[in-house]
Image: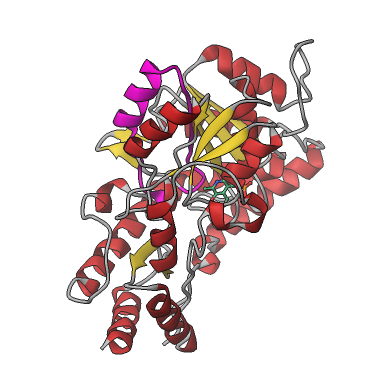
Amino acid sequence: MAVSFYNFHDLHHSDFKSEVKSRINSIIDNNAFVEGEYNQAFEKEFAKLQKAKHCLLVANGTDALEIALLAHGIGAGDKVGVPGITFYATAEAVLNVGATPVWIDVDEQAGLFCPESMKRVHEKHHLKAVMPVHIYGLPCPMDDINSYCQENKIHVIEDAAQAQGTFYKADSPIGDSPNLVTFSFYPTKNLSAFGDAGCILTNDDELAKKIIVIRNHGRGDEQAMGRNSRCDHIQAAVLHAKLPEVTKFNNMRKKVADTYHKALADLPVKLLDEKFICLSSWHLYPIQLESIKQREGLMNHLRSKDIGCTPFYERTLSQEPALDGFDGEDVKAKAFAGRTLCLPMNPFLSGEDVNEVASEIKDYLS
Ligand SMILES: Cc1ncc(COP(=O)(O)O)c(C=O)c1O
């Protein structure tokens, strides 16, 4: 029985499609293609959902990171702490503003940004900013990170590209934060556009003003360096139409994660801590194998049975050829990247789907 990684068919059900088609028709009829009424409506409602004061839509998640760095005045000569386990864009944003990435190691259980590594790296490198990544939808240990960074005047930019619907604590969603928090709405994300889009959340009025200027060519401020990072009205209309269902779909992902945890409990694979069942948005469901060889073997076995799976991430950023030569810590990140495999994860997986995946894993490992 095939089990697919994503399920766009059920996500874009017929009621949703009719609603979006009618919105797109009205956008065409009104010639309102950029920064229209749905941009404002989405910004207001997404900020409320994430308990932030401001949401500023931008063109994509990489721009969101770059604009956040620029809003803090980070550029040439500055060092920015980036975890080894993340998508390339986190480091790319640092390089694009002219700053230098320095690797921060991760914890070996979850692949999350490690505060202890950050402290050691800061003592040596005097970081101007750090970018904890809520990888897979798991929340980073922000209390530790924030208290150290506040004491040491280090800017914190949270990369929440994969974390729409994640909670730091029971009733504190990602965005309920003193930091700039950035999201991607790339089509595979839990809350997704029909193309590229992203946003930045902040509780700081001054930073919000700067971001509004930077995303629109620096207009309205003679000093500001700007760019074109406006969000298309059609993308905002799609995102706004999806908002009413995002919490329901994230809760369905939590149920799928819980079912996986139970189905895999007796197998020789490492699972994420139970505490994440409620906190994570379960953008992805990673398991850890004993070795790269075992991970490759299991991946090939599952794919031969039409079960979608992906080794996010095969390498740490420090192992990417284009990012070779930067300093920092990455020993645990390297071990983590070599052993991780992400299983199918979407809100519409049935108990039967999950049991099928678990049974194929069991067959392969026994
Ligand atoms: C952790 C992380 N940061 C940044 C990005 C970049 O987002 P975008 O592709 O929207 O530019 C992504 C996208 O996948 C991501 O996963």
Left-right relation of 163 to 269: right
Residue 102, position as x, y percentages in the image: 53, 38
For residue 124, what is the image quadrant? top left
Residue placed most toward the observer, 125 or 255: 125
Please report the residue visible at 38 percent of the width from the left and 28 percent of the height from the top.
176
In the rendered structure, does residue 158 fall within the stretch colored magenta?
yes
In the rendered structure, does residue 62 fall within the stretch colored magenta?
no
Please report the residue visible at 73 percent of the width from the left and 43 percent of the height from the top.
26
Above or below residue 270? Residue 209 is above
Segment tinted magenta in the rendering: 137-162
Residue 250, position as x, y percentages in the image: 38, 52
Residue placed most toward the observer, 84 or 217: 84
Please report the residue visible at 79 percent of the width from the left and 10 percent of the height from the top.
222
Left-right relation of 238 to 202: right
Left-right relation of 346 to 218: left
Left-right relation of 77 to 177: right
Please report the residue visible at 79 percent of the width from the left and 37 percent of the height from the top.
30
For residue 334, what is the image quadrant? bottom left
Q: How is the image coloured?
A: secondary structure
Q: Quadrant of the C terminus?
A: bottom left
For residue 9, what is the image quadrant? bottom right
Residue placed most toward the observer, 275 or 366: 366
